[in-house]
Image: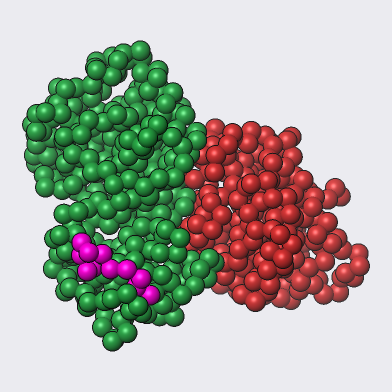
């Protein structure tokens, strides 16, 4: 049985207590008892788009266009791939044919015009489609497929890459940390007094096949923070309660918003924030995330929440115990401590946060 | 969209609605009245021309309406419907599962009903609403607000000869409504099963061609009553309600 065919909360959960490096092998279904009443858990409710469009250039060359995020106006950011498909690892795929502004790409009846090519990489483009509104969305869902993964043995259908609470289709790859969270667990979290809040963050592409472009990932991403969530985060912080993110996208949205003039506010925004071990989180105390390996950008992000030695030990432990990495795999919970009293308690200044920012 | 949870009543202004079977009859009338009340409406039906005509008519009167051509009985259509709707009007606040099929007409006794025809009726009338609700109600539960209306029939409680497949599907839909209601009671998502009564629609004419249309209710008037029920402050989640008192 493959990962996505399992019940959502059957996924395993590796717990890392950042303050002492302790590791615990648990299941996602245990999450309610692992968190504390009063914790605020923030989820990304972005649905996953069928962001992979296969078509041809004006010269008849095969091309795959992967949307890289929601549009700004009528201009969609996108990354071009050459011939081949997801069965070939992204980094081994043929380079796409060179395109210039004005090039028309045809995906069945849907046509996209290249309106800009990035200086950073010729694969990174902006396109404008030949229709809008109802007609564009219908066409995208007819010709598009979810971004696929070479490690997987079959095509992923659209429903397999959605969370149980997905709303607007903003993500071009699944906000995967939320995928194992079914409503049995989410309901139990609420009943235990753990507050749930949400935002929408346009999770971007994980790989482009271009080393230069990959090194620049994640690209700037759009987010939208509801008023209720901004208030919930502010209230939790003022009361000394923990703010926990489900997924690195939520970390990026909240920490990116917190760095805007005036601090974290409700509303839409775009963040280019790259979170590493050198960044001190201002809002988020811990996170639920996938099983990440050294060298991945997500692993570097974890360095903002746990010392390097503890992360390395957790990575070795996950490898030994057979935790499944990648988008359809198991989860990790990284928190200062499982005991709220040992981490942050109401009224305790944020200086209680583990001092690890300089250990990497 | 932000705002307080609905609690027990719903102001339709600035809500996002998704109505299936919206190209004609009760579905179209419901879309019109929801849009007139200020809801941004996404209309779903299989037939493109009448659906787009219905949406255009709403837009012509200043309402917000979008047309999505899809078959709610098709498993592959469910996520695209929900996602496109959310893209066009925001996360859905009101889902009206109105699309349904009688199965082959003239209606048949159960002994003459093909198994495949029963399956198709259940796919459209029961499994389709289950699938669409499953995709839409998770977002509602996270936001702590939302209403799902399942359009029922008196055939769900009365045993009329020859209405077997349709009746079974609507009876199960009523119970599905109740189970959704108890499971999501704490999540702030409400469910109603509404029996619209006999209306002057193409479906009714297909089922009972001998009926005198002048004796049947106008779908627009029934839709107005259903809109009032949607906004009603005193209806318990899971209730089965008659739109027009018998």
Q: Which picture quadrant has residue A292?
A: top left
Kindly tell me whether residue B217 is visible in this rendering: yes
Left of B50 or right of it: where is A319?
left
Decide if residue A68 is on the left or right side of residue B82.
left
Residue B190's x, y, as percent?
Answer: 62, 41
Start and end of the magenta stretch?
A113-123
Q: Which of the 4 image quadrants contains residue A157?
A: bottom left
Where residue A34 appears, as percent x and y from the top left, is: 30, 26
Q: Quadrant of the C terminus of chain A?
A: top left
> Which residue shows up at 13% across the image and 45% down it?
A293
Whether residue A133 is in magenta: the answer is: no
Could you say which quadrant of the image residue B178 lies in? top right
Way the structure is coloured: by chain
Q: Residue at x 53, y 49 (%)?
A: B91
Quadrant for the N terminus of chain A in the image: bottom left
- The structure residue drawn at horizontal position 71% and vertical position 59%, both measured from the top left corner, is B62
Chain given the colour red: B
Chain A painted colour: green
Task: Give percent across and percent down for residue A61.
Answer: 26, 83
Q: In percent of the image, x 83 and y 56: which residue is there?
A: B221
On screen, residue B57 above or below A181: below
- Is residue A108 positioned above or below A205 on the image? below
The mark tally for this picture is 0
The front one of A74 and A184 is A74
* Rendered position, A91 above or below A341: below
């Amino acid at each position: 049985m493959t990962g996505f065919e399992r019940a959502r909360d059957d996924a395993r959960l590796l717990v890392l207590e950042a303050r002492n490096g302790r590791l615990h092998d648990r299941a996602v279904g245990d999450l309610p008892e692992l968190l504390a009443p009063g914790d605020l858990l923030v989820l990304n409710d972005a649905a996953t788009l069928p962001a992979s469009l296969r078509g041809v250039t004006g010269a008849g060359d095969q091309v795959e266009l992967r949307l890289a995020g929601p549009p700004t106006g009528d201009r969609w950011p996108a990354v071009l791939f050459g011939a081949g498909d997801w069965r070939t690892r992204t980094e081994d795929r043929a380079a796409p044919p060179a395109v210039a502004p004005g090039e028309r790409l045809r995906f069945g009846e849907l046509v996209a015009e290249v309106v800009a090519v990035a200086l950073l990489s010729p694969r990174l483009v902006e396109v404008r489609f030949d229709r809008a509104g109802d007609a564009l969305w219908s066409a995208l869902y007819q010709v598009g497929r979810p971004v696929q993964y070479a490690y997987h043995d079959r095509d992923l259908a659209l429903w397999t890459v959605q969370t149980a609470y997905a709303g607007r289709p903003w993500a071009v790859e699944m906000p995967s940390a939320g995928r194992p969270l079914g409503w049995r667990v989410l309901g139990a979290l609420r009943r235990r007094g753990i507050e749930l809040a949400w935002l929408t963050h346009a999770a971007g592409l994980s790989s482009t096949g271009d080393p230069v472009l990959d090194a620049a990932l994640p690209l700037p991403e759009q987010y939208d923070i509801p008023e209720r969530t901004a208030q919930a985060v502010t209230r939790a912080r003022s009361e000394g309660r923990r703010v926990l993110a489900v997924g690195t996208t939520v970390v990026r949205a909240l920490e990116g918003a917190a760095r805007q003039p005036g601090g974290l506010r409700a509303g839409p925004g775009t963040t280019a924030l790259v979170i590493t071990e050198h960044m001190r989180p201002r809002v988020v105390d811990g996170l639920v995330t996938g099983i990440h390996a050294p060298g991945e950008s997500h692993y570097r992000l974890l360095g903002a929440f746990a010392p390097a030695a503890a992360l390395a030990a957790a990575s070795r432990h996950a490898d030994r115990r057979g935790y499944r990495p990648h988008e359809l795999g198991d989860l990790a919970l990284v928190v200062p401590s499982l005991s709220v009293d040992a981490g942050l308690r109401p009224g305790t200044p944020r200086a209680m946060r583990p001092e690890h920012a300089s250990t990497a | 969209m932000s705002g307080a949870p609905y609690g027990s009543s719903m102001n339709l202004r600035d809500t996002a609605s998704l109505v299936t079977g919206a190209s004609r009859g009760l579905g179209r009338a419901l879309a019109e009245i929801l849009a007139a009340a200020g809801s941004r409406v996404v209309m779903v039906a299989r037939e493109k021309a009448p659906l787009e005509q219905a949406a255009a008519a709403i837009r012509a009167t200043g309402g917000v309406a979008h047309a999505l051509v899809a078959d709610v009985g098709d498993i592959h259509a469910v996520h695209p419907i929900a996602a496109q709707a959310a893209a066009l009007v925001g996360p859905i606040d009101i889902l009206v599962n109105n699309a349904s099929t009688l199965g082959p007409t003239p209606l048949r006794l159960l002994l003459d009903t093909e198994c495949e025809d029963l399956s198709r009726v259940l796919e459209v009338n029961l499994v389709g609403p289950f699938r669409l609700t499953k995709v839409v109600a998770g977002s509602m539960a996270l936001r702590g607000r939302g209403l799902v209306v399942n359009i029922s029939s008196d055939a769900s409680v009365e045993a009329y000869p020859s209405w077997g497949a349709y009746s079974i599907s609507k009876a199960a839909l009523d119970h599905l409504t109740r189970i959704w209601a108890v499971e999501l009671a704490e999540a702030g998502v409400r469910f109603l099963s509404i029996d619209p009564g006999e209306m002057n629609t193409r479906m009714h004419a297909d089922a009972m061609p001998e009926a005198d249309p002048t004796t049947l209710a106008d779908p627009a008037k029934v839709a107005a009553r259903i809109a009032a029920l949607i906004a009603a402050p005193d209806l318990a989640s899971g209730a089965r309600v008659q739109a027009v008192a018998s």
